[in-house]
């Protein structure tokens, strides 16, 4: 294989693709990037067998073929090459990079041993604006479980219906749900759970603009946009029926400036204990946020609010609380409370498309 391309294009592509490689004792080729030159395309491919990526780069094709290169070494090398254009040539298990001032050769492995990315037999396909999908995933990701004790929680639940997509995530202590509506590119119904690693890589790789085409098959999913596609296995399991957990009514509802609330929570968090606890005392006209730590001290701070319903005090894990307030967005935050032990619902004022449910950590 032989191709000429810009160093910037190659460097950016390698940085994206490198994250999909992995160390594998019995399959060392998984730590390599597969470079594939076809008649009209130049692709960089990487996989850890659970999630994979194909990234297309524009270039002047001299000779079709394939090669592999250690991802880490290739990435490090490209960071040190300032030249604008670069020639890549793969032959006899080696990849040679040439620029006006530099020649470097990396020893690779047999490209024939690189695993093929799976061909998915699509059972459902839909399209959605990249900006909408990025935004929705960003809002629910904070609630996603970070361990595999319950595999069905270590990902994002995706439900489609005609014209709509609902994304949800939970770690049993909090729940984030976002619904996108009026989507012309979504025609049919379906359910799946997208693994956490895949969601995180989507947020790193997906463009800010354009459309994303999503194809769901048996235990697999593909996300495609101009210049790239990400393939992933799906989590085999049943997401909990979380809608039953969302209260129908609340004892207290209060509206507060979101930025001010974030600042006050962070201030109170300075004195939080190992429980990461902060206390919210809610009245119809104010919220007082406080912490007491026998070892370091205490603080109380207050900000104006507009509320209705019963006054009371509730204690939250401040990290969980911050995640919900920040994810809700908007200028104003709505806090819906059910006493000291009931679940609280956080939303942006006037925006019911996003809901964040969080449990208090103890009664006071």
Image (cartoon, rainbow, N blue to C red):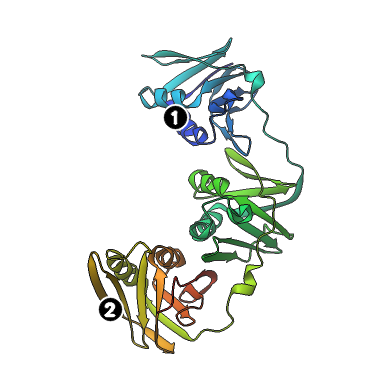
Location of residue 181 in the rendering, given as x and y in whole percent from the top left corner: 62, 66
Which residue corresponds to the image point at 45% horizontal and 76% vertical from the top-left? 349
Q: Quarter of the image holding residue 323? A: bottom left
In the shown orientation, is residue 83 left or right of residue 95? left
Q: Which of the pair 58/113 is nearer the observer?
A: 113
Q: Quarter of the image holding residue 67? A: top right
Location of residue 78 in the rendering, given as x and y in whole percent from the top left corner: 41, 25
Mark closest to the chain's N terminus, 1 or 2: 1
Which residue corresponds to the image point at 57% horizontal and 38% vertical from the top-left? 227
Residue highlighted by disc 1: 11
Asked if 220 appears above or below 36 in the picture, the reply is below
- Where disc 2 sits, the SS reads strand
Location of residue 137 in the rendering, given as x and y in whole percent from the top left corner: 54, 56
- Where disc 1 sits, the SS reads helix
Which residue corresponds to the image point at 43% horizontal and 26% vertical from the top-left? 7
What number of labels is visible? 2
Location of residue 299 in the rendering, given as x and y in whole percent from the top left corner: 24, 72
Residue highlighted by disc 2: 302
**From the image, which quarter does the N terminus lie in?**
top right
Which is in the foreground here, disc 1 or disc 2? 2
**From the image, which quarter does the C terminus lie in?**
bottom left
Identify the residue at the far front of this view.
294
Q: CA distance from mark 1 to mark 2?
A: 50 Å
Q: Quarter of the image holding residue 257? A: bottom left
């Amino acid at each position: 294989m032989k191709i000429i391309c810009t160093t910037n294009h190659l460097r950016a592509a390698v940085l994206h693709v490198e994250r999909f490689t992995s160390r594998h004792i019995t399959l060392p080729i998984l730590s390599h990037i597969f470079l594939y030159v076809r008649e009209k395309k130049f692709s960089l491919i990487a996989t850890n067998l659970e999630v994979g990526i194909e990234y297309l780069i524009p270039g002047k094709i001299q000779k079709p073929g394939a090669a592999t290169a250690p991802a880490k070494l290739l990435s490090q090398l490209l960071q040190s090459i300032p030249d604008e254009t670069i020639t890549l040539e793969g032959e006899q298990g080696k990849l040679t990079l040439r620029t006006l001032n530099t020649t470097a050769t990396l020893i690779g492995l047999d490209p024939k041993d690189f695993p093929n990315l799976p061909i998915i037999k699509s059972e459902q396909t839909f399209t959605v604006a990249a900006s909408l999908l990025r935004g929705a995933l960003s809002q629910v990701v904070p609630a996603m479980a970070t361990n595999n004790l319950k595999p069905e929680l270590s990902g994002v639940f995706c439900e489609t219906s005609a014209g709509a997509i609902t994304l949800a995530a939970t770690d049993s202590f909090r729940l984030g749900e976002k619904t996108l509506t009026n989507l012309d590119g979504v025609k049919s119904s379906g359910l799946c759970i997208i693994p956490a690693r895949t969601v995180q890589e989507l947020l790193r790789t997906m463009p800010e603009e354009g459309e994303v085409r999503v194809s769901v098959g048996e235990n697999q999913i593909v996300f495609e946009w101009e210049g790239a596609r990400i393939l992933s296995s799906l989590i085999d399991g049943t997401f909990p029926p979380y809608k039953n957990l969302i209260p129908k009514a609340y004892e207290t509802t209060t509206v507060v400036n979101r930025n001010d609330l974030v600042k006050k929570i962070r201030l109170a968090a300075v004195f939080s204990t190992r429980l990461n606890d902060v206390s919210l005392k809610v009245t119809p006209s104010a919220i007082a946020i406080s912490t007491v730590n026998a070892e370091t001290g205490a603080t109380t701070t207050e900000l104006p609010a507009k509320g209705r319903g019963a006054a009371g005090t509730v204690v939250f894990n401040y990290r969980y609380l911050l995640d919900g307030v920040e994810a809700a967005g908007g200028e104003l935050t709505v806090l819906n409370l059910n006493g000291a032990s009931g679940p609280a619902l956080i939303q942006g004022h006037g925006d019911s498309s996003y809901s964040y449910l969080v449990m208090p950590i103890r009664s006071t």
